[in-house]
Every structure is written in C-alpha cells, then in structure tokens.
Amino acid sequence: MPDETPHEDRPAAAPGEGRRAVPAPSPPADSTSTDEAPKDDPLKDDPAKDDVPEGEPAKGGPGGGESAEDGPERLAEEAKMPSGALDPEKTDKPFGERDPATGGPVERSRDEDAVKPVPPEPGAPDPAHDIEQRRREAGVDHRFPFGRPGEPLGRAHPFVFGFTAALGVITAWMLVKAATNAKSVIVMIVVAMFLAVGLNPAVERLRRIGLPRGVAVGTVFLGVLAFFAGFVASLVQPVSEQVTELRKNIPDYVTQLQNNERLAEWDKRYGLLDRAQKAVNSKGFQDGLTDTATGIGKVAINGVFQTVTILILTLYFLSSLPQIKTFFYQLAPRSRRARVALLGDEILDRIGGYVAGQFTIAFIAGLTSYIFLEIMSVKYALALALIVAVTDLIPLVGATVGAVVVCLVAFLTGTVTDGSICIAFYVIYQQVENYVVYPRVMKRTVDVQPAVTIVAALIGAALLGVVGALLAIPTAAAISLLIREVLMPRQETL
C-alpha cells in the first residue's frame, strides 16, 4: 500500500541529514493496488517512474505539491517557455541557490508577493511617531528591511540640473584659466601653424617640378631662414656704427651742455645740475636702471626663444601637414567627410593665398622704400627698406610703423627738409597701399571684400594685437566661405 500520510503532516527532516529527505521504502505494489489506482494519476503512465532506481524517491510527492525533493532541474523546466526562453515571470526565483549554513534551498518571494508601500491616507498616523504606520508606508518586508527604495532622480530633477550646470560652469572656468595661463604657448602654436599653412603652397609648387616633399620643405624653410638672417645682418652694421659714434661723441655733448648759456642760466636759477647729480647718485635711480636693463634683457631673451620655437614648430608642422589634415578630416562623420575635406582644403588654400599676398605687399613696400631712400641719399637705405618690408607684414598699420622709423632716421642723419619729404612720401604711400594695393591683392588671393578685410584687421588687432591682425583676415575668409557654402544653402531649404 502506498503511504497516504499527508505531506504537511510528515515529520520534518533533521538538519544535517543530507540535502534530500529519503522517504521510507514503499511495499511492492501488487496487481490489486495497481488496479485500484486512480485513472487520472499522472504518475501511472509516466515511463520515468519505472526507471527510478530502488531506494530513490519519485519526483513529485503523493501530495502533489513541491517539496524539498524538487531540484533546480524541475524549476528550470517549469520556467521555460515553449520557445525555450525563460519565462520572465518565473525567473525571479533563483535556481540551485542554497543556504551556506544549512545546505537547504533558499526560497525568495516573488515581486507579486512582496509587500507594497501603502500611500498615506487622510487621517493616518504620522510615520515619524507611529512605527507600524512607518513600516506600512515604507513597504517593509524580508527583502527590504528598511523599506523599498524610491524612484531614482531623473535628469529633469532640480538638484541634478543644478549640479550638472554648476559642474559645467566650474569646468568652463578651469578651461578658460588654463588657456589664459598657456596663452603664450597657444599663440606660438597658432602662429607656427599659420606660417606652415601659408608656406605650404610654395612646397606644393616645388613638388610639381619633381622634388620630394622633404627636399621641398627644406628648401622653403632655408629660404625663410635666409630672409630673417639677412634682415638681422642688415641691422647689425648701422646699429654698431651708431653705438660707436655715440660713445665717441659723449664728451662733445657734455662740453656743449656746459657751454650752453641757456642751460647755465637755468642752472643758476633752478639748480638743475645739482638735482641731476643727486638723482643719478641716488639708490632708487640705480635700482631702477638695473631693473630696466634686466627687463630689456629678459624681453630680448624671451623674444629670441619664441622666435626659435616658432621656427622649429613651423618646420615640424610644414613637414607633417598632410598627416595633420588627414587626422582632422577623419574626425568628421564618414557621410560628410568628403565635403569637409573639400571645404578644409579650400580654407587652407585661402590661408596660403593670404600669406603669399602679404609677402607680395611687403615686397612692394620694401622695394619702393629702397628706391625712394636711395634717391634721397638717406643713410642705411637697405636696412631701413628691410624694416619697412618686415613691419608691412602687419595689416593696415605695419607700413606706418616702418615709416615712423625711416622718418626719424632721416631727421637725425639729414636735414629737416629730408625728414619732411620722407613724411610726405609715406603718408601718400600709406593711402595708396591701404585703399588700392591691399584690397586688390586680398581680393585675388583670399576672395574677401575690401570692407571685410579692414573690419577684420581692426577687430583682430583689438583682440590679440599684432597676432590678431595677422590672423584676422584668413579667419574672416574661412568664415565667409562656410557661410556661403553651408549656412546659406541650408537657409534656402527651410
């Protein structure tokens, strides 16, 4: 006879007896008991029942409910869907998880069996004072002993928005501060890249005649070095001669000051010589003179260092310019990379045209100044012409700076008439260059309207000084190209 003891009335297995409770062996079933078995018994025709070895329990107790004998395989089979996937409503129960202390299976309640938080009702006790109400509203159960956690903060939450905005402001401020501290380095990098892009058309022309890129870059760079070396060499002779002449004439200047009747009268009336002697012998004057000399030396050393750094960076940028362009073009999406490359090449060509135009204008100014100074028989005509050519690289005001130097030298080395003629010549030339030569050259090389050229140069000079004036016009050319090729076609489609 089969054991008919109800499942819930059986004695519980003592802990430590094993993972599964082994039931008492049932007596062999005879034909009578077999015939009296219910017809709807699911275990009657189960072929797996006959294959169970003697001494092992059959799956599914007589009571029909799940018992400790049900292993992970039975639970996994129940959680499977017809497609083979796991039923999401039945996978919350972990399969095969056992208590490390007792070795028995760990039963976890499903989400539908978990205690739900109870919303506060009107007239309900305050959870700050009533512990039971606190437990009910928090939804305390064995899974969440301190209540179910609330919904996470969304991006639209005021705290999240305020924290993100504050973090963005702090990051932006730190970036601005870092850029301000590294301003000199950034300016050198920008100038070097600008020169490399401007010299690249000359390199490409040398490549068209069959020179390798390395040889072409070296040739162009040596030409730039030769230009700067010639400019410095042309200034060495006049400066050294003037210093020598000044050293020789100092005693004569002192004698003239002593024999000057007007100065002697002022000295008797105001004691100028005594005051000058006390000022020169004072400690403050000597310290100030030392600080001034030290500052001039630092400025000179810093200028030489920056010049050498810019030349080295220009050489590196010029030699690797194709790789640099390819790297930045690859940052664009693949679907727009071709158009970005075309626009980028056009912008770089315009920058190169601007540099070529600036050198053309500077060459015209230097050549015109040299011819004029030779006609006027002004000393150091070649050096002064080179000064005019170099300063003329600065848009709009460069020629004026060079003209002031030339006129000052003409007054000191010549007569008042020579200086007056120089002033008149450069006033006329400045107007011709600003309103005739410069706009025409920029129109052909950069394709920027004359008014835009002048406005851009003024704004750039106000923002970054000489460097801003140099970079303003190619920047304006790039912006005008992007507006014409990107913004305006998009506006037509709206």
Image: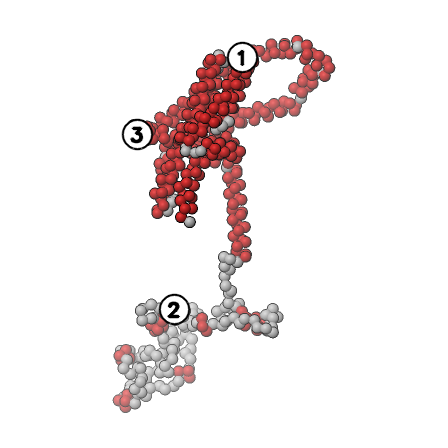
Please state if 204 lies on the left or on the right of 8 as rendered. Answer: left
Query: Residue 451, position in %: x, y?
Result: 48, 33
Judge whether 101 appears above or below 28 on screen. Answer: above
Residue at 51%, 27% in the rendered image: 397
> What amino acid is labelled 2 in the image?
Pro
The residues tagged by marks 3 and 1 sit, at their Cα atoms, a distance apart of: 50 Å
Please state if 314 lies on the left or on the right of 141 as rendered. Answer: left
In this view, the mark in front (2 or 1): 1
Judge whether 106 appears above or below 156 on screen. Answer: below
Q: Quick check: can you spot residue 281?
A: no
The residues tagged by marks 2 and 1 sit, at their Cα atoms, a distance apart of: 101 Å
Q: Quick check: can you spot residue 161?
A: yes
In this view, the mark in front (2 or 3): 3
| Residue holding disc 3 | 208
> What amino acid is labelled 1 in the image?
Gly
Secondary structure beneath disc 1? loop
| Residue holding disc 2 | 88
Res 195 → quadrant: top left
